[in-house]
Amino acid sequence: MNNIYNTQKLQESARDHLWMQFTQHSVYEEDLSKLPVIVRGEGHHIFDSTGKKYFDGLAGLFVVAAGHGRERIAEAVAKQAEQLAYFPIWSYAHPAAIELAERLAGYAPADLNRVFFASGGGEAVETAYKLVKQYWKLRGRPGKHKIISRAVAYHGTTHGALSITGIPGLKEPFEPLVPSTFRVPNTNFYRATEHADDLEAFGRWAADRIEEQILFEGPETIAAIFLEPVQNAGGCFPPPPGYFARVREICDEYDVLLVSDEVICAFGRIGDMFACNALGYVPDIITCAKAMTSGYAPIGATIVSDRIFEPFATGTNSFAHGYTFAGHPVAAAAALENLDIFEEEKLNEHVRENSPKFRAALERLLDLPIVGDVRGEGYFFGIELVKDKVTKETFSEEESNRLLRGYLSPALWDAGLYCRADDRGDPVIQLSPPLTIGEPEFDEIEGILRSVISGALNLI
Protein backbone atom coordinates (compact mmCIF):
# COMPACT_ATOMS: atom_id res chain seq x y z
CA MET A 1 0.00 0.00 0.00
CA ASN A 2 1.33 3.42 -0.93
CA ASN A 3 2.12 5.67 2.00
CA ILE A 4 -0.26 8.60 1.65
CA TYR A 5 0.12 9.79 5.24
CA ASN A 6 2.46 12.42 6.60
CA THR A 7 3.49 10.34 9.61
CA GLN A 8 5.57 13.01 11.31
CA LYS A 9 2.78 15.57 11.07
CA LEU A 10 0.26 13.10 12.50
CA GLN A 11 2.61 12.23 15.36
CA GLU A 12 3.23 15.89 16.16
CA SER A 13 -0.48 16.65 16.16
CA ALA A 14 -1.19 13.64 18.39
CA ARG A 15 1.53 14.72 20.80
CA ASP A 16 0.17 18.27 20.97
CA HIS A 17 -3.58 17.58 21.10
CA LEU A 18 -4.57 13.94 21.62
CA TRP A 19 -4.71 12.83 25.25
CA MET A 20 -4.13 9.11 24.84
CA GLN A 21 -5.53 6.79 27.48
CA PHE A 22 -3.44 4.85 30.01
CA THR A 23 -0.42 6.56 28.44
CA GLN A 24 2.85 7.99 29.77
CA HIS A 25 3.03 10.96 27.44
CA SER A 26 6.57 11.87 28.44
CA VAL A 27 7.75 8.95 26.28
CA TYR A 28 6.60 10.79 23.17
CA GLU A 29 8.07 14.10 24.30
CA GLU A 30 11.43 12.34 24.40
CA ASP A 31 11.07 10.35 21.18
CA LEU A 32 8.13 11.06 18.88
CA SER A 33 9.06 8.18 16.58
CA LYS A 34 7.77 5.76 19.24
CA LEU A 35 4.18 6.94 18.68
CA PRO A 36 2.44 4.49 16.29
CA VAL A 37 -0.37 5.82 14.09
CA ILE A 38 -2.65 2.99 12.94
CA VAL A 39 -4.53 3.74 9.72
CA ARG A 40 -6.03 0.49 8.42
CA GLY A 41 -7.14 -3.01 9.38
CA GLU A 42 -7.63 -6.09 7.24
CA GLY A 43 -8.52 -9.53 8.59
CA HIS A 44 -6.17 -10.18 11.50
CA HIS A 45 -3.68 -7.49 10.50
CA ILE A 46 -3.33 -3.76 11.13
CA PHE A 47 -1.20 -1.24 9.23
CA ASP A 48 0.52 1.91 10.47
CA SER A 49 0.93 5.23 8.64
CA THR A 50 4.26 4.12 7.17
CA GLY A 51 2.63 1.03 5.62
CA LYS A 52 4.12 -1.48 8.07
CA LYS A 53 1.97 -4.54 8.74
CA TYR A 54 1.34 -6.05 12.18
CA PHE A 55 -0.43 -9.17 13.42
CA ASP A 56 -3.27 -8.01 15.68
CA GLY A 57 -2.74 -10.45 18.53
CA LEU A 58 -5.11 -8.62 20.89
CA ALA A 59 -8.06 -8.02 18.55
CA GLY A 60 -7.61 -4.29 19.15
CA LEU A 61 -8.44 -4.53 22.83
CA PHE A 62 -10.22 -7.90 23.10
CA VAL A 63 -12.71 -6.42 20.62
CA VAL A 64 -12.32 -7.19 16.89
CA ALA A 65 -13.57 -10.78 17.11
CA ALA A 66 -14.74 -11.12 13.50
CA GLY A 67 -11.64 -9.40 12.12
CA HIS A 68 -10.90 -6.05 10.50
CA GLY A 69 -12.38 -4.75 7.26
CA ARG A 70 -15.79 -6.45 7.28
CA GLU A 71 -17.55 -4.52 4.53
CA ARG A 72 -20.97 -5.94 5.32
CA ILE A 73 -20.87 -4.49 8.85
CA ALA A 74 -19.85 -1.10 7.42
CA GLU A 75 -22.74 -1.34 4.97
CA ALA A 76 -25.22 -2.21 7.72
CA VAL A 77 -23.99 0.79 9.71
CA ALA A 78 -24.38 3.11 6.71
CA LYS A 79 -27.87 1.82 5.93
CA GLN A 80 -29.02 2.33 9.53
CA ALA A 81 -27.49 5.83 9.66
CA GLU A 82 -29.46 6.80 6.58
CA GLN A 83 -32.71 5.47 8.01
CA LEU A 84 -32.40 6.52 11.68
CA ALA A 85 -29.05 7.83 12.83
CA TYR A 86 -30.05 8.43 16.44
CA PHE A 87 -32.91 8.35 18.88
CA PRO A 88 -32.78 7.71 22.64
CA ILE A 89 -34.39 4.73 24.33
CA TRP A 90 -35.55 6.81 27.30
CA SER A 91 -39.25 5.77 27.27
CA TYR A 92 -39.01 5.18 23.51
CA ALA A 93 -37.83 2.26 21.39
CA HIS A 94 -36.52 1.68 17.89
CA PRO A 95 -36.35 -1.55 15.84
CA ALA A 96 -32.57 -2.09 16.02
CA ALA A 97 -32.49 -1.92 19.84
CA ILE A 98 -35.59 -4.12 20.11
CA GLU A 99 -34.16 -6.77 17.79
CA LEU A 100 -30.75 -6.76 19.47
CA ALA A 101 -32.26 -7.05 22.96
CA GLU A 102 -34.31 -10.06 21.85
CA ARG A 103 -31.23 -11.59 20.21
CA LEU A 104 -29.08 -11.21 23.33
CA ALA A 105 -31.81 -12.60 25.57
CA GLY A 106 -31.98 -15.61 23.27
CA TYR A 107 -28.27 -16.29 23.70
CA ALA A 108 -28.32 -15.78 27.47
CA PRO A 109 -29.05 -18.71 29.80
CA ALA A 110 -32.23 -19.44 31.76
CA ASP A 111 -34.49 -16.41 32.36
CA LEU A 112 -31.97 -13.63 31.66
CA ASN A 113 -34.47 -11.89 29.41
CA ARG A 114 -34.09 -8.16 30.11
CA VAL A 115 -31.41 -6.10 28.36
CA PHE A 116 -30.32 -2.64 29.55
CA PHE A 117 -28.01 -1.01 26.99
CA ALA A 118 -24.97 1.18 27.64
CA SER A 119 -22.18 2.67 25.52
CA GLY A 120 -19.47 0.24 26.63
CA GLY A 121 -18.22 -2.26 29.19
CA GLY A 122 -17.43 0.08 32.07
CA GLU A 123 -20.90 1.59 31.79
CA ALA A 124 -22.44 -1.90 31.75
CA VAL A 125 -20.64 -2.72 35.01
CA GLU A 126 -21.63 0.65 36.50
CA THR A 127 -25.22 -0.15 35.54
CA ALA A 128 -25.07 -3.54 37.24
CA TYR A 129 -23.58 -1.98 40.39
CA LYS A 130 -26.34 0.61 40.70
CA LEU A 131 -28.99 -1.91 39.72
CA VAL A 132 -28.19 -4.44 42.45
CA LYS A 133 -28.24 -1.72 45.11
CA GLN A 134 -31.65 -0.44 44.04
CA TYR A 135 -32.97 -3.98 43.60
CA TRP A 136 -32.38 -4.82 47.25
CA LYS A 137 -33.94 -1.53 48.35
CA LEU A 138 -37.07 -2.34 46.36
CA ARG A 139 -37.07 -5.77 47.98
CA GLY A 140 -37.14 -4.10 51.39
CA ARG A 141 -33.52 -5.00 52.25
CA PRO A 142 -31.57 -1.73 51.99
CA GLY A 143 -28.75 -3.10 54.14
CA LYS A 144 -27.61 -5.32 51.25
CA HIS A 145 -25.27 -2.88 49.51
CA LYS A 146 -21.76 -4.36 49.80
CA ILE A 147 -19.95 -5.82 46.77
CA ILE A 148 -17.39 -8.62 46.57
CA SER A 149 -14.88 -9.03 43.73
CA ARG A 150 -11.52 -10.74 43.30
CA ALA A 151 -7.94 -9.64 43.86
CA VAL A 152 -6.28 -8.04 40.82
CA ALA A 153 -9.61 -8.08 38.92
CA TYR A 154 -10.37 -5.23 36.51
CA HIS A 155 -14.00 -4.14 36.11
CA GLY A 156 -13.73 -0.66 34.59
CA THR A 157 -12.73 2.95 35.23
CA THR A 158 -15.96 4.71 36.17
CA HIS A 159 -16.12 5.59 39.85
CA GLY A 160 -18.28 2.65 40.85
CA ALA A 161 -16.66 0.10 38.55
CA LEU A 162 -13.21 1.23 39.69
CA SER A 163 -14.31 0.70 43.28
CA ILE A 164 -15.09 -2.94 42.42
CA THR A 165 -11.76 -3.31 40.61
CA GLY A 166 -9.09 -5.13 42.62
CA ILE A 167 -5.92 -3.41 41.39
CA PRO A 168 -4.65 -0.99 44.07
CA GLY A 169 -2.36 0.92 41.71
CA LEU A 170 -5.26 1.86 39.43
CA LYS A 171 -7.43 2.99 42.33
CA GLU A 172 -4.95 5.03 44.39
CA PRO A 173 -4.99 8.26 42.29
CA PHE A 174 -8.79 8.54 42.58
CA GLU A 175 -9.42 7.58 46.20
CA PRO A 176 -11.58 7.82 48.17
CA LEU A 177 -13.81 5.67 46.01
CA VAL A 178 -17.21 4.11 46.72
CA PRO A 179 -16.96 2.32 50.08
CA SER A 180 -18.00 -1.22 51.02
CA THR A 181 -16.34 -3.25 48.28
CA PHE A 182 -14.28 -6.26 49.32
CA ARG A 183 -11.76 -8.59 47.70
CA VAL A 184 -11.40 -12.39 47.76
CA PRO A 185 -8.66 -14.57 46.20
CA ASN A 186 -8.64 -15.09 42.43
CA THR A 187 -8.09 -18.41 40.65
CA ASN A 188 -4.36 -18.06 39.88
CA PHE A 189 -3.45 -21.73 40.32
CA TYR A 190 0.14 -21.15 39.21
CA ARG A 191 0.65 -19.01 42.33
CA ALA A 192 -1.51 -21.12 44.64
CA THR A 193 -0.34 -21.42 48.23
CA GLU A 194 -3.29 -23.64 49.17
CA HIS A 195 -3.86 -26.97 47.38
CA ALA A 196 -1.10 -26.14 44.92
CA ASP A 197 -1.06 -29.78 43.73
CA ASP A 198 -4.81 -30.20 43.21
CA LEU A 199 -6.63 -27.86 40.81
CA GLU A 200 -10.15 -28.88 41.81
CA ALA A 201 -9.40 -28.62 45.53
CA PHE A 202 -7.84 -25.21 44.93
CA GLY A 203 -10.99 -24.09 43.13
CA ARG A 204 -13.12 -25.21 46.05
CA TRP A 205 -10.80 -23.38 48.44
CA ALA A 206 -11.00 -20.16 46.39
CA ALA A 207 -14.79 -20.33 46.17
CA ASP A 208 -15.08 -20.99 49.89
CA ARG A 209 -13.22 -17.75 50.57
CA ILE A 210 -16.29 -16.01 49.10
CA GLU A 211 -18.50 -17.70 51.67
CA GLU A 212 -16.01 -16.75 54.37
CA GLN A 213 -16.16 -13.07 53.31
CA ILE A 214 -19.97 -13.12 53.20
CA LEU A 215 -20.16 -14.55 56.69
CA PHE A 216 -17.57 -12.11 58.02
CA GLU A 217 -19.40 -9.06 56.69
CA GLY A 218 -22.85 -10.53 57.32
CA PRO A 219 -25.06 -11.99 54.55
CA GLU A 220 -27.64 -9.30 55.24
CA THR A 221 -25.12 -6.69 53.96
CA ILE A 222 -23.85 -8.36 50.75
CA ALA A 223 -25.63 -7.34 47.55
CA ALA A 224 -23.61 -9.11 44.85
CA ILE A 225 -20.34 -10.63 43.74
CA PHE A 226 -18.76 -9.57 40.42
CA LEU A 227 -16.66 -12.25 38.68
CA GLU A 228 -15.14 -12.55 35.22
CA PRO A 229 -15.47 -16.07 33.74
CA VAL A 230 -11.74 -15.92 32.93
CA GLN A 231 -10.07 -13.12 34.89
CA ASN A 232 -8.14 -10.79 32.60
CA ALA A 233 -5.86 -8.69 34.83
CA GLY A 234 -2.98 -10.70 36.20
CA GLY A 235 -2.89 -12.75 33.03
CA CYS A 236 -5.84 -15.00 32.14
CA PHE A 237 -6.93 -16.95 35.23
CA PRO A 238 -9.42 -19.67 34.18
CA PRO A 239 -11.85 -21.09 36.75
CA PRO A 240 -10.91 -24.51 38.14
CA PRO A 241 -13.41 -27.34 37.64
CA GLY A 242 -16.36 -26.91 39.99
CA TYR A 243 -15.48 -23.33 40.96
CA PHE A 244 -18.54 -21.60 39.53
CA ALA A 245 -20.87 -24.39 40.63
CA ARG A 246 -19.70 -23.79 44.21
CA VAL A 247 -19.98 -19.99 43.80
CA ARG A 248 -23.56 -20.36 42.55
CA GLU A 249 -24.34 -22.59 45.52
CA ILE A 250 -22.93 -20.00 47.94
CA CYS A 251 -24.85 -17.15 46.29
CA ASP A 252 -28.10 -19.10 46.51
CA GLU A 253 -27.53 -20.02 50.15
CA TYR A 254 -26.90 -16.43 51.29
CA ASP A 255 -29.16 -14.62 48.80
CA VAL A 256 -26.31 -12.83 47.01
CA LEU A 257 -26.55 -11.88 43.33
CA LEU A 258 -23.94 -13.31 40.95
CA VAL A 259 -22.77 -10.90 38.24
CA SER A 260 -20.85 -12.49 35.36
CA ASP A 261 -18.65 -9.69 33.97
CA GLU A 262 -18.22 -10.85 30.38
CA VAL A 263 -17.04 -7.60 28.81
CA ILE A 264 -14.04 -9.55 27.47
CA CYS A 265 -15.25 -13.15 27.57
CA ALA A 266 -18.61 -12.88 25.77
CA PHE A 267 -19.13 -13.30 22.02
CA GLY A 268 -16.79 -16.11 21.15
CA ARG A 269 -13.70 -15.41 23.21
CA ILE A 270 -14.31 -18.63 25.19
CA GLY A 271 -16.19 -20.39 22.37
CA ASP A 272 -19.79 -19.39 23.15
CA MET A 273 -21.88 -16.25 22.88
CA PHE A 274 -21.70 -16.07 26.67
CA ALA A 275 -18.86 -17.65 28.62
CA CYS A 276 -21.18 -18.66 31.46
CA ASN A 277 -22.84 -21.04 28.98
CA ALA A 278 -19.47 -22.54 28.07
CA LEU A 279 -18.46 -22.89 31.71
CA GLY A 280 -21.82 -24.22 32.88
CA TYR A 281 -23.23 -21.70 35.34
CA VAL A 282 -26.23 -19.36 35.40
CA PRO A 283 -25.61 -15.86 36.79
CA ASP A 284 -28.25 -13.36 37.80
CA ILE A 285 -26.72 -10.62 35.65
CA ILE A 286 -24.34 -10.57 32.66
CA THR A 287 -22.35 -7.50 31.64
CA CYS A 288 -20.99 -7.44 28.09
CA ALA A 289 -19.66 -5.12 25.37
CA LYS A 290 -16.48 -5.17 23.20
CA ALA A 291 -16.95 -8.02 20.69
CA MET A 292 -20.72 -7.52 20.49
CA THR A 293 -20.02 -5.37 17.42
CA SER A 294 -16.43 -6.57 16.83
CA GLY A 295 -15.54 -2.93 17.49
CA TYR A 296 -17.35 -1.47 14.49
CA ALA A 297 -19.39 0.74 16.85
CA PRO A 298 -19.41 1.16 20.65
CA ILE A 299 -22.12 -0.58 22.68
CA GLY A 300 -22.51 -2.43 25.97
CA ALA A 301 -25.30 -4.24 27.78
CA THR A 302 -26.39 -5.44 31.21
CA ILE A 303 -28.58 -8.52 30.88
CA VAL A 304 -30.70 -9.41 33.91
CA SER A 305 -33.01 -12.19 35.01
CA ASP A 306 -36.77 -11.83 35.21
CA ARG A 307 -36.40 -12.04 38.98
CA ILE A 308 -34.21 -8.92 39.06
CA PHE A 309 -36.49 -7.02 36.69
CA GLU A 310 -39.71 -7.88 38.53
CA PRO A 311 -39.73 -5.10 41.17
CA PHE A 312 -38.98 -2.50 38.49
CA ALA A 313 -42.08 -3.56 36.57
CA THR A 314 -44.58 -2.74 39.30
CA GLY A 315 -46.26 0.45 40.49
CA THR A 316 -44.29 3.68 40.08
CA ASN A 317 -40.87 2.03 40.33
CA SER A 318 -38.25 2.73 37.68
CA PHE A 319 -34.48 2.46 37.27
CA ALA A 320 -33.44 6.14 37.11
CA HIS A 321 -30.29 5.46 35.14
CA GLY A 322 -29.21 5.64 31.51
CA TYR A 323 -26.83 6.95 28.86
CA THR A 324 -27.42 9.26 25.91
CA PHE A 325 -25.98 6.83 23.39
CA ALA A 326 -27.24 3.58 24.96
CA GLY A 327 -28.81 1.28 22.41
CA HIS A 328 -27.68 3.60 19.62
CA PRO A 329 -29.39 2.54 16.35
CA VAL A 330 -26.15 2.46 14.38
CA ALA A 331 -24.31 0.47 17.05
CA ALA A 332 -27.21 -1.96 17.36
CA ALA A 333 -27.21 -2.47 13.59
CA ALA A 334 -23.47 -3.20 13.70
CA ALA A 335 -24.04 -5.72 16.49
CA LEU A 336 -26.81 -7.53 14.62
CA GLU A 337 -24.71 -7.86 11.46
CA ASN A 338 -21.69 -8.97 13.48
CA LEU A 339 -23.75 -11.65 15.24
CA ASP A 340 -25.03 -12.82 11.86
CA ILE A 341 -21.38 -13.34 10.85
CA PHE A 342 -20.76 -15.29 14.04
CA GLU A 343 -23.59 -17.68 13.23
CA GLU A 344 -22.98 -18.00 9.49
CA GLU A 345 -19.23 -18.61 9.86
CA LYS A 346 -19.64 -20.70 13.04
CA LEU A 347 -17.00 -18.70 14.88
CA ASN A 348 -17.86 -20.18 18.28
CA GLU A 349 -17.43 -23.69 16.91
CA HIS A 350 -14.18 -22.60 15.26
CA VAL A 351 -12.80 -21.39 18.61
CA ARG A 352 -13.83 -24.57 20.42
CA GLU A 353 -12.24 -26.75 17.75
CA ASN A 354 -8.99 -24.80 17.49
CA SER A 355 -8.38 -23.68 21.08
CA PRO A 356 -6.41 -26.85 21.98
CA LYS A 357 -4.16 -26.28 18.95
CA PHE A 358 -3.59 -22.65 19.97
CA ARG A 359 -2.70 -23.77 23.49
CA ALA A 360 -0.34 -26.46 22.18
CA ALA A 361 1.49 -23.93 19.99
CA LEU A 362 1.97 -21.57 22.93
CA GLU A 363 3.01 -24.39 25.27
CA ARG A 364 5.99 -25.05 23.00
CA LEU A 365 7.40 -21.86 24.54
CA LEU A 366 7.69 -23.62 27.90
CA ASP A 367 11.13 -24.84 26.82
CA LEU A 368 12.40 -21.26 27.23
CA PRO A 369 13.98 -20.67 30.65
CA ILE A 370 11.85 -17.64 31.57
CA VAL A 371 8.46 -18.98 30.42
CA GLY A 372 6.84 -20.26 33.61
CA ASP A 373 3.21 -20.82 32.70
CA VAL A 374 0.79 -20.83 29.76
CA ARG A 375 -2.86 -20.54 30.74
CA GLY A 376 -6.24 -19.50 29.43
CA GLU A 377 -9.37 -20.67 27.61
CA GLY A 378 -10.72 -20.38 24.08
CA TYR A 379 -8.76 -17.73 22.18
CA PHE A 380 -7.63 -15.97 25.36
CA PHE A 381 -4.20 -16.89 26.74
CA GLY A 382 -1.53 -15.55 29.06
CA ILE A 383 2.17 -16.45 29.17
CA GLU A 384 3.76 -15.74 32.54
CA LEU A 385 7.46 -14.90 32.65
CA VAL A 386 9.55 -15.86 35.67
CA LYS A 387 13.07 -15.39 36.93
CA ASP A 388 13.39 -19.01 38.08
CA LYS A 389 11.14 -21.77 36.71
CA VAL A 390 11.87 -24.16 39.57
CA THR A 391 11.01 -21.77 42.41
CA LYS A 392 8.58 -19.64 40.31
CA GLU A 393 10.46 -16.58 41.53
CA THR A 394 9.14 -13.48 39.80
CA PHE A 395 10.93 -10.30 38.83
CA SER A 396 11.39 -7.23 40.99
CA GLU A 397 9.43 -4.12 40.05
CA GLU A 398 12.52 -2.59 38.46
CA GLU A 399 13.34 -5.79 36.56
CA SER A 400 9.74 -6.19 35.41
CA ASN A 401 9.61 -2.61 34.17
CA ARG A 402 12.86 -3.07 32.25
CA LEU A 403 11.72 -6.41 30.83
CA LEU A 404 8.20 -5.42 29.80
CA ARG A 405 8.35 -1.74 28.92
CA GLY A 406 12.01 -1.46 28.19
CA TYR A 407 12.29 -4.53 25.96
CA LEU A 408 9.30 -6.81 25.31
CA SER A 409 6.63 -4.30 24.32
CA PRO A 410 8.79 -2.44 21.77
CA ALA A 411 10.49 -5.64 20.57
CA LEU A 412 7.19 -7.44 19.94
CA TRP A 413 5.88 -4.38 18.11
CA ASP A 414 9.04 -4.11 15.99
CA ALA A 415 8.71 -7.83 15.19
CA GLY A 416 5.21 -7.22 13.86
CA LEU A 417 3.08 -8.58 16.71
CA TYR A 418 0.63 -6.37 18.58
CA CYS A 419 -0.26 -7.93 21.94
CA ARG A 420 -0.05 -6.93 25.60
CA ALA A 421 2.94 -7.23 27.91
CA ASP A 422 1.30 -6.58 31.27
CA ASP A 423 2.42 -6.34 34.88
CA ARG A 424 -0.89 -5.92 36.70
CA GLY A 425 0.23 -8.78 38.86
CA ASP A 426 3.23 -10.79 37.66
CA PRO A 427 4.79 -10.19 34.20
CA VAL A 428 2.55 -11.72 31.54
CA ILE A 429 2.20 -11.58 27.76
CA GLN A 430 -1.49 -11.69 26.83
CA LEU A 431 -2.98 -12.88 23.56
CA SER A 432 -6.57 -12.41 22.42
CA PRO A 433 -6.54 -12.47 18.59
CA PRO A 434 -9.47 -12.32 16.16
CA LEU A 435 -11.52 -15.52 16.27
CA THR A 436 -10.98 -16.20 12.57
CA ILE A 437 -7.36 -17.38 12.82
CA GLY A 438 -6.16 -21.00 12.74
CA GLU A 439 -3.10 -23.24 12.85
CA PRO A 440 -0.86 -21.26 10.46
CA GLU A 441 -1.41 -18.12 12.55
CA PHE A 442 -0.81 -20.01 15.81
CA ASP A 443 2.59 -21.03 14.49
CA GLU A 444 3.31 -17.49 13.30
CA ILE A 445 2.50 -16.07 16.75
CA GLU A 446 4.61 -18.70 18.48
CA GLY A 447 7.54 -18.00 16.18
CA ILE A 448 7.51 -14.26 16.86
CA LEU A 449 7.15 -14.80 20.60
CA ARG A 450 9.99 -17.33 20.65
CA SER A 451 12.35 -14.97 18.87
CA VAL A 452 11.52 -11.98 21.05
CA ILE A 453 11.46 -13.82 24.39
CA SER A 454 14.77 -15.51 23.54
CA GLY A 455 16.21 -12.04 23.05
CA ALA A 456 15.15 -11.15 26.59
CA LEU A 457 17.40 -13.81 28.09
CA ASN A 458 20.40 -11.51 27.83
CA LEU A 459 18.60 -8.94 29.99
CA ILE A 460 17.96 -11.21 32.97
Image: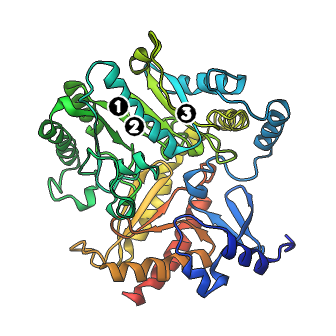
Nearer to me, 50 or 198:
50
Q: Residue at x 43, y 35 (%)?
A: 128
Q: Three-letter amino acid code at disc 2?
A: Tyr
Q: Amino acid at mark 1?
A: Lys
Check disc 2 and report the residue beneath it. Answer: 129
Q: Position of residue 182 (x, y in %)?
A: 25, 47
Q: Which residue is mark 3?
A: 322
Judging depth in this view, the residue of 362 and 256 nearest the camera is 256
SS state under label 1: helix
Label 3's element? loop
- Pointer 3: residues within 10 angstroms few (<14), some, or many (20+)? some
For the N terminus, the image quarter is bottom right
Asked if disc 1 and disc 2 are in contact, CB closer than 8 Å, the reply is yes
Describe residue 142's horizontal placement relative to residue 300 as left or right. left
Relative placement, left or right, of 31 versus 457 is right
Please say if 442 is above or below 222. Answer: below
Compared to residue 343, the image places residue 365 above or below, namely below
Amino acid type shown at disc 3: Gly
**Res. 155 in view:** no
- Give residue 208's position: percent from left, percent from top: 17, 40
Q: Alpha-carbon distance for marks 1 and 2?
A: 7 Å
Instruction: Name the residue furthest bottom.
Output: 458
